[in-house]
Image (cartoon, helix red, strand yellow):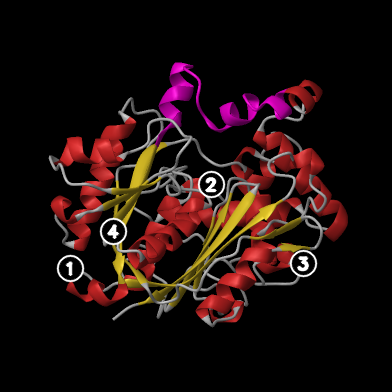
């Protein structure tokens, strides 16, 4: 469904209440580690299955991100876990936007009786690739694109920090957003990472004074406005909600999901609304499916490759008016303990891509599941509704999760 003359909404059927996430698992998330990405994925999947109380031979579906190197396929699953059963396979899973839409694809597979226990996994070793200078990393996918290589790279509009620094400057021009307001997101993320046992930046505190004292990296960005590059993997296990009570832990129910797109794809020089994201389409649709409003959300996690992307999604998902995101995030309004009382919202309570790890968003979903179970390191009091905002530039997803019984 097209809308606003620059993007639109992918038509989705209503799957509210049909699917539950019943297990989550991760590896250690690190800088350069030299670990094999398939081995990391296997570890994360094993941890997720153990968390759910499900045996590997009970799994009959696997999801991963197609088109990305070294992802955990059905053959990898069978080889590692010693099973020869047939598996339903979808390459429309993994991380980024698809960490949010994987439950929708799983719901359709369950409706068709193609699978009943489905694992979604993602793995990345970009920190090791970067250290070894063997290619890879987020810039490679853009550099190798024919259109970007021909029309953006030659003019210096590359890589991702350059795109988003330009977007941040435009947001500042249009709405008066300040460096200190972007810094508030970086500082909040770091504060949460400092008290999260799995965060890469656990032992590296950051104050707003520290942030403002840094020289610009790519104006107006400081280095802390930009995400980490990490090694690591994560996974989650899904089954039908009516079967989930048989699992080891209380299920987390998928209440709503939606996906939207920008017609300019990842050609940021061509975006008509450079200070907006497709969340303006996907978030309202997911809320409608879930029967909630933004005001009902207890904890939010969004894909945050840069502080400005986090800020724009907070606005576009309806947590404040467009252009007022800077004021919304100031001070401790994103803090997991005080955010709601300050008129804000607990946000990226594990530290996000900025300070937890760059596992491309799947760890955000893992964190929200733990929040709704009451198991999070930075636990939000009485969390009932959690939302993930996925982002790739070309696409956004919105996933609404609710506490199960």
Q: Which residue is mark 3?
A: 322
71 relative position to 49: left or right: right
Q: Is residue 350 visible?
A: no
Label ID, residue 354: 2
Residue depicted at 73% across the width and 49% down the height: 263
- Report which quarter residue 250 is drawn in: bottom left
**What is the crowding at mark 3: few (fewer than 14 residues within 10 Å), some, or many (at least 20)?**
some
User: Residue 40 magenta-drawn?
Assistant: no
Q: Which residues are magenta?
A: 124-149
Callouts 2 and 3 close, C-beta under 8 Å: no
Relative depth, front residue between 342 and 42:
42
Judging from the image, what secondary structure is the residue with disc 1 in? loop
Q: Sequence-wise, which precedes: disc 1 or disc 4?
A: 4
Distance from the alpha carbon under mark 1 to that under mark 3:
42 Å
Q: Position of residue 75 (x, y in %)?
A: 26, 36
- Depth check, mark 1 against mark 3: the one in front is 1
Q: Which residue is mark 1?
A: 248
- Report which quarter residue 276 is drawn in: bottom right
Q: Position of residue 209 (x, y in %)?
A: 64, 50
Label ID, residue 328: none
Per the picture, the main secondary structure of the magenta-coloured stretch is helix
Residue depicted at 47% across the width and 17% down the height: 134
- Depth check, mark 1 against mark 4: the one in front is 4
Residue found at the far right of this picture: 173
Label ID, residue 115: 4
Q: Position of residue 326 (x, y in %)?
A: 72, 62
Judging from the image, what secondary structure is the residue with disc 4 in? loop
């Amino acid at each position: 469904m097209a809308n606003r003359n620059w993007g639109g909404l992918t038509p989705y059927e209503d799957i509210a209440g049909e699917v539950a996430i019943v297990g989550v698992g991760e590896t250690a998330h690190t800088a350069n580690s030299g670990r094999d990405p398939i081995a990391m994925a296997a570890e994360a999947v094993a941890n997720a299955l153990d968390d759910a109380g499900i045996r590997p031979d009970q799994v009959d579906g696997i999801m991963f991100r197609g088109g990305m190197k070294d992802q955990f396929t059905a053959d990898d699953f069978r080889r590692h876990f010693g099973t020869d059963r047939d598996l339903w396979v979808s390459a429309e899973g993994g991380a980024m936007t698809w960490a949010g839409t994987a439950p929708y694809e799983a719901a359709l597979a369950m409706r068709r009786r193609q699978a009943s226990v489905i694992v979604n996994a993602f793995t990345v070793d970009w920190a090791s690739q970067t250290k070894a200078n063997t290619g890879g990393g987020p810039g490679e996918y853009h550099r190798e694109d024919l259109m970007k290589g021909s029309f953006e790279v030659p003019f210096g509009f590359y890589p991702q920090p350059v795109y988003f620094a330009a977007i941040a400057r435009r947001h500042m021009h249009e709405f008066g957003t300040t460096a200190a307001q972007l810094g508030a997101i970086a500082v909040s993320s770091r504060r949460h990472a400092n008290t999260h046992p799995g965060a890469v930046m656990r032992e590296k505190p950051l104050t707003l004074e520290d942030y403002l004292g840094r020289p610009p990296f790519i104006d107006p960005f400081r280095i802390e406005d930009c995400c980490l590059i990490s090694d690591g993997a994560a996974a989650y296990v899904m089954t039908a909600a009516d079967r989930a009570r048989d699992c080891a832990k209380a299920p987390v129910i998928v209440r709503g999901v939606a996906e939207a797109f920008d017609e300019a794809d990842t050609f940021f020089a061509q975006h008509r609304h450079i200070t907006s994201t497709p969340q303006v389409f996907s978030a309202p649709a997911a809320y409608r499916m879930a029967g909630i409003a933004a005001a009902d959300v207890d904890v939010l996690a969004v894909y945050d490759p840069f502080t400005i992307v986090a800020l724009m999604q907070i606005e576009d998902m309806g947590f404040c008016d467009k252009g007022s995101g800077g004021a919304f995030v100031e001070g401790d309004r994103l803090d997991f303990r005080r955010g709601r009382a300050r008129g804000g919202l607990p946000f990226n309570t594990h530290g996000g891509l900025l300070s937890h790890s760059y596992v491309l968003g799947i760890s955000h979903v893992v964190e929200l599941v733990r929040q709704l179970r009451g198991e999070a390191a930075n636990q939000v009091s009485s969390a009932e509704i959690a939302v993930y905002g996925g982002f790739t530039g070309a696409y956004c997803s919105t996933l609404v999760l609710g506490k199960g019984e």
